[in-house]
Image: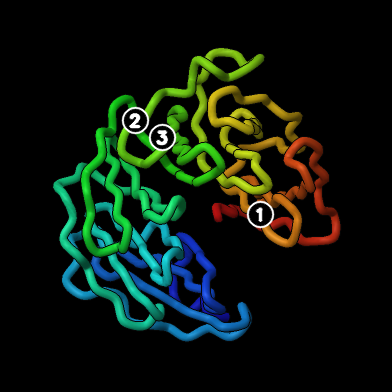
């Protein structure tokens, strides 16, 4: 019942060092809840003094620290309880953050910033990046996805992946989720697309089980899991063949 009591909380979730951390909030306050078992949750105070809007949109765990981002801020914690907001380079907007290659990378419209410790941030050369909604890390580096797809070996310099979408029509949709596991990048979004790549260069469109926009994808316990905006959930061991779960209720409006 926690999420009914904390409206507009659920924007993103991360797990690390035995701790689940969910973030969200409103334009005037950022919210954080933590759990050690995924069932019992404690509401924490977010970071004070953030620039509005304060809603935390994305969170990542790496190097012993949690890093979350709002549109204009980065917040950092070692325990999910106490948060600070370090200074960051001038940005347009942040929408997603990930950890890989011993550094955090946060992305947004025409914006990329990186940090090795979550405290000291460096602006990247956003280059062709337009409006990313998700970012992940894999064997050849970082991959961001939104109104297109872009790859980077280090989070600083980026190249456009759109011309390398194997067998796909002209890209006119929007990608909302991305993950990487077992050497496979998986990107999901509108037009019922599930795209996979092993090199973040050539992408293959896999048959989608969904009728609607796919909003999120994750990997755990040997499976990829994707969810669409009607609440349908699908699973796959290899991201190539997907099965719709039929033993769960349809959850309207799932986004993450």
Identify the element where label 1 is drawn.
Answer: strand
- Rounded to the nearest angstrom, the CA distance separating label 2 from label 3 is 11 Å
Assess disc 2: are there few (<14), some (14-19) or many (≥20) residues with their C-alpha within 10 Å of its C-alpha: many
Q: Position of residue 238 (x, y in %)?
A: 77, 42
On screen, residue 54 versus residue 155, left or right, reads: left
On the image, numbered disc 1 is attached to which residue? 219
Residue at x 32% of width, y 25% of height = 128
Please name which of the two marks, 3 or 1, marks the residue nearer to the observer.
3
N-terminal of the pair, mark 2 or mark 1, is: 2
Of residues 141 and 168, the one drawn nearer to the viewer in this rendering: 141
On screen, residue 206 versus residue 117, left or right, reads: right
Identify the element where label 2 is drawn.
Answer: loop
Identify the element where label 3 is drawn.
Answer: strand
Work out whether 231 lies above or below 249.
above
Of residues 74 and 191, the one drawn nearer to the viewer in this rendering: 74
- Determine whether label 3 and label 1 are within 8 Å by CB: no
- Rounded to the nearest angstrom, the CA distance separating label 3 from label 1 is 21 Å
N-terminal of the pair, mark 2 or mark 3, is: 2
Residue 253: which numbered mark, if any? Answer: none
């Amino acid at each position: 019942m926690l999420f009914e009591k904390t409206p507009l909380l659920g924007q993103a979730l991360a797990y690390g060092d035995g701790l689940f951390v969910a973030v969200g909030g409103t334009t005037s306050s950022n919210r954080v809840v933590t759990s050690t078992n995924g069932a019992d949750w404690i509401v924490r105070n977010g970071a004070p003094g953030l620039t509005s809007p304060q809603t935390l949109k994305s969170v990542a765990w790496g190097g012993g620290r949690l890093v979350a981002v709002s549109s204009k801020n980065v917040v950092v914690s070692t325990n999910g309880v106490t948060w600070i907001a370090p200074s960051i380079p001038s940005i347009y907007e942040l929408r997603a953050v990930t950890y890989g290659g011993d550094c955090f990378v946060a992305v947004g419209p025409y914006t990329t910033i990186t940090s090795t410790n979550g405290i000291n941030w460096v602006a990247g050369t956003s280059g062709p990046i337009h409006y990313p909604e998700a970012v992940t890390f894999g064997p050849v580096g970082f991959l961001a996805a939104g109104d297109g797809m872009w790859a980077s070996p280090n989070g600083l310099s980026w190249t456009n992946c759109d011309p390398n979408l194997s067998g796909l029509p002209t890209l006119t949709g929007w990608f909302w989720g991305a993950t990487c596991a077992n050497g496979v990048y998986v990107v999901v979004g509108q037009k019922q697309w599930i795209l996979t790549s092993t090199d973040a260069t050539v992408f293959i469109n896999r048959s989608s089980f969904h009728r609607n926009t796919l909003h999120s994808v994750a990997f755990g316990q040997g499976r990829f899991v994707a969810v669409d905006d009607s609440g349908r959930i699908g699973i796959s061991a290899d991201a190539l063949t997907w099965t719709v779960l039929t033993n769960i209720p349809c959850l309207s409006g799932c986004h993450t």
